Amino acid sequence: MDRGPPRPAGGGGGRGVTPPPEPPEGPEGPEFSLADVAREGLIERPGADPAPHDGTGRVDLTFTVHSLAPDGTAAPPTQRGVRVPPGVTVFDAASWNGIAIDSTCGGHGTCHKCRIQVTTATEVAVTRHDVRTFTSAQLAEGWRLGCLVHATRDLAVEVPPLTTRPKAATVGIGRQVILRPALQKRYVELAEATLADQRTDLVRLTDAIDDLELTADLHVLRRLSTVLREADFKVTAVVIDEALIDVEPGDTTAARYAIAFDLGTTTVVGTLLDVGTGTPMAVASMLNAQQPFGGDVITRISATMMDKDALGRLQQAAASTLSALAGEVCREAGVDPTQVYEVAIAGNATMTALALGIDPEPLGVAPFVMSAAQPPSVLAAEIGLTLHPRARAFFFPALGAYVGGDIVAGMLATGMDRDKRTRLFIDVGTNCEIVLSDGEKILSTAAPAGPAFEGGAIRCGMRAADGAIEVIKVDPHAQDGDPAVTLGVIGDVEPKGLCGSGLVDAVAELVRVGLLDPSGRLVPDEDAKDIAPALADRLTKIGEERVFVLHRPTPDADPAECVYLSQRDVRELQFAKAAISTGWSLLLEELGLEHGDVQQVLLAGSFGSYLSPASAVRIGLVPQLPVLRIVAAGNVAGEGAKMALLSVRERAGALALLEEVTYVELSDRPDFNDAFVDQLSFRH
Amino acid sequence: MDRGPPRPAGGGGGRGVTPPPEPPEGPEGPEFSLADVAREGLIERPGADPAPHDGTGRVDLTFTVHSLAPDGTAAPPTQRGVRVPPGVTVFDAASWNGIAIDSTCGGHGTCHKCRIQVTTATEVAVTRHDVRTFTSAQLAEGWRLGCLVHATRDLAVEVPPLTTRPKAATVGIGRQVILRPALQKRYVELAEATLADQRTDLVRLTDAIDDLELTADLHVLRRLSTVLREADFKVTAVVIDEALIDVEPGDTTAARYAIAFDLGTTTVVGTLLDVGTGTPMAVASMLNAQQPFGGDVITRISATMMDKDALGRLQQAAASTLSALAGEVCREAGVDPTQVYEVAIAGNATMTALALGIDPEPLGVAPFVMSAAQPPSVLAAEIGLTLHPRARAFFFPALGAYVGGDIVAGMLATGMDRDKRTRLFIDVGTNCEIVLSDGEKILSTAAPAGPAFEGGAIRCGMRAADGAIEVIKVDPHAQDGDPAVTLGVIGDVEPKGLCGSGLVDAVAELVRVGLLDPSGRLVPDEDAKDIAPALADRLTKIGEERVFVLHRPTPDADPAECVYLSQRDVRELQFAKAAISTGWSLLLEELGLEHGDVQQVLLAGSFGSYLSPASAVRIGLVPQLPVLRIVAAGNVAGEGAKMALLSVRERAGALALLEEVTYVELSDRPDFNDAFVDQLSFRH
């Protein structure tokens, strides 16, 4: 692939930047035929590439963006370089990177508005839509419809000033998303039928919305003629993608709502969005009502294998959780639930299967197979949500049984496929998902970390709730009443236990001061006195097991009444972190990279976002890197779900990830066990 | 458009007939690029035409069909000329005319099997699928994939011998339909998943059926993993179009059933078909259970306007009628209803709306507007049918509120759009639909004939059931005990009344012998004795109204106890026939044709098929033509429904009719009343 710098605008075969041409009116516009185009050696090949690419690597697009000053004169153009997977359209590449190009049809080649000029001296295909839009001279100058140019090599592109100003929203990790939601509303005032104009009601409506190719199902047809006549032919069409889902009397275009769900195994978060402005109207979260069936996906899958009714009850529990959140955000924002027309749901493969009522058993047993990577579009009502009766539910696709839709959403929110840097994405949890991109290739894998990070199998473990110790600092030589142990406690209350980030801090601090040796063993009491005189008295025993006391409720409390870290807790964490670091180590190895090559580590998920980067480095949970390179990414699954609601192109980007990302199955690798043993140690 | 004769095979630029090339294996096959194609001046433009046509007229295709003798040597080729609307693919044109070309994908460009050679010296577009299938030399010789060549001008086409023998069925008016039903079953034996092959269950299945681009909905995904594993990965995929609707354990390919419904206002007919062989397995008919709401569409529409619950009850009545017929044909053929996967329904616009639960009110009041011309594809369950739970229902599209899906089906069955002759199609009934084609243009209209033909508003009128007089011959000079009136009675029982064909015969015979004058008046008694001595005593009075007695139960029966034709009955028929003949007269006028130009009149519908052609000519119901040109077409709506089930291409042909046929609204014409008055007379 040609990776040379794009030819600067104005160079290359005399293709100077000319003002954007006026699009010809109607289909009778073009003054020349396809035969003329053929004579000029331009080939029409919508969707095809002159040199088919293998789905790997990236192409560089250099956009020169023109705009008008407030007084209507040309402002100095700005230049932006972007890097996208080959085959992406110029329109999508711009859109994904916050560069606005005129469009009303959303890249379907029908509105003929996304006019751009390719100034690279390379032949770019002419489609029949281009022929209808541009003159022969304009085509020769490189003018094309941006949504039909597939970037298969580096290109320089001129973007004319916008004729309409699209709205944009910033979501995810600084992602600027141009609003083009799947949900659209169009208010139309139609002429009434006459004997001379007997168009069907549907055609009368769709003729007025001719930039979309609308389809109507039976339910909307059953209402259509009545609503049109009762509303005096002044109605609002409610459209998702190109499906007409309802016709509402009068102008209801202001009410365009959707809900983004992060459907976690533990916690579920819902965000009500006004997709017309990108504004989040309300957010709510609650525990997943599936909890009684088990804390993690494996126990829930097991439940369905033990009891044939469990699948139905798990599905019902997912539905009731999503319903409760939907009700809560609508109430909070004062929005009528029937004005919510779409939901997007980012969940792991098991949560997705359970919400849809698909038997998850094959996800839970080798060889870990999904029914389908991309769940079909369903009605929100089919998953138990009472919103608009024809509201749609979009589920994110999954890369594998253990790299699910939540991770795909997270990759979308973090732009994992649209960044030149070498970046490592780690969603820390019972099942830990890892994605590594070197700017060319993207690998993913899943590591079975076990429940330690969720507080499971840890003596004093608890979830990150009030009373949980989440931050720990120790001073081995504290004197004069200075605290030897400083605790950060959620809710600033009496400590009740240790959550995942506290566990990592505790182990990291004890490793740092030497009370835990590299093998993960608490040092003998006699050594502790030398190493950390201010902390030595906290080393004690409960039964036969050695523990380190983090908090004593009263000075003379029995150790068993204290919050402590036990030797077994350390082992739990040690195994968990070894599983994870084995995962990313093998991915680094696959791409021939060293720790230091990683330019950014994104810690995702509700646990990762609270983790101390330094502690993560200290215990080897992440590569040995300067802590500034370790970034908490927040609820990236929820952010990805919002992006999917705000932009059909972002949603298409999520689907494209299925092709771009290579899934590496760790359990199939002969070198896994050796690597795992290497990673058990706390010394790197 | 070039309408010259197609260049004979072997002529034209040295493009001799060569044996069909072997298709290259896999995507790495082509040894040359699209750039090479561009150099040769061939443009790829799938779906586009070099000279866009206006949807009118026809193109001539000459097929030279090669075949192999039983010993494997080449048999002498046969030649067939066909005439199709411009833009139709060569594959469809062949298929519609019973010429078989290899294909497994059904014209989607994916199986790469429908290889044909265009021998006309005209440039035919090369698509990227052609590039993958043929060598550069073969492309230069005119080899193309037939499903991607759109015939926009006259072409000569060589068809290589079939490598597989498709099945065909004869339906409609001698229509040979090549079986390619929307319903397909595919038996596959899949490899079980392993850690090295973690393809999703859906991909594992669709990879094995790679000539179709299958989509799966939630319902099939819910079953998929369980069925695959329980059936040891040996399953049958049930596909409609490209939708995977079910996965059945084991090999169930032998059970492929569908039901064709003619959903008439009066009578509903269901035919169970084995779509794998085209064999009708059972036929049943019954009265439409909507009868209590009124005998014709207007009274049923009125019912919905009077009573807001009536629509639901009419929908329920349609559902119960269709269900009862489905049950009956399945029982008769010993077929499990869950093995019926599709139904096709041909009904007029009102019957279609009522079956779908769509408010028919706008159909019943000016300006007579439909909700949609093409009803959406729905589940059979949504219209109350208990067949396979995901069975689909296809409704025929309508041309207008009064030229409905039954007429579109009838046009399909009679090949109205694929015949060079000037043909007139008349479906006689309360609402009479008329279609006129001169081989180039097709016009349609509807004439409000009133209930006379159904026996309504006729003193002794009755439906065509046992006891109805359906044939009448009179001999005005009968002597020596020869009958003066000969009656054909349905069921050969005592006559009880007069059905539509009997009514037409009665009037026609009385016109013929002169007892009815051209204005439609029964001649005075004194004239009758001279004109028809053997019949004069049958002219009498009931009250003040003159009648002609057809049948006396006893020699001295009172006239009121007899079966008779009254003066008012004659007026009813006169108005009905005037409405109809005004319709076709105005259509003939539109195309600049005279009566004698009509080469065939097709009398369709349950009434039309029983009508005496001579009587129809005599009373002026049809143009003045030799009776051999008047053909009873039978239940063409039902035949069209069968064709739609047996061939996706025929179904596409039905949809294409919406574009090809021009609907003429009579009630909007200023010349209608003049024409109507002209047509009232019985003398032409």
Image (cartoon, coloured by chain):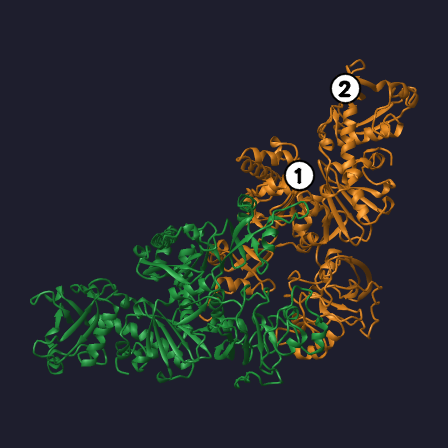
Chain colours: A green, B orange
Amino acid type at circle 2 is Cys
| Image mark 1: chain | B
SS of the residue under disc 1? loop
Amino acid type at circle 1 is Gly
The residue at the point 61 percent across, 52 percent down is A203
Residue B562 numbered mark, or none: 2
Relative to the observer, which residue lies in front, B597 or B177? Answer: B597
Q: Is residue A386 visible?
A: yes
Tell me the quarter of the image containing the N terminus of chain B. Answer: bottom right
Categorize mark 2 by other alpha carbons within 10 Å: few (<14), some (14-19), many (20+): some
SS of the residue under disc 2? loop
| Image mark 2: chain | B
Left or right: residue B532 versus residue A403 is: right
Q: How far from the left and from the top, in percent, is residue B619?
A: 83, 34
- Work out whether B605 lies above or below B565: below
Residue B264 numbered mark, or none: 1
Distance from Cα at disc 1 to Cα at disc 2: 31 Å
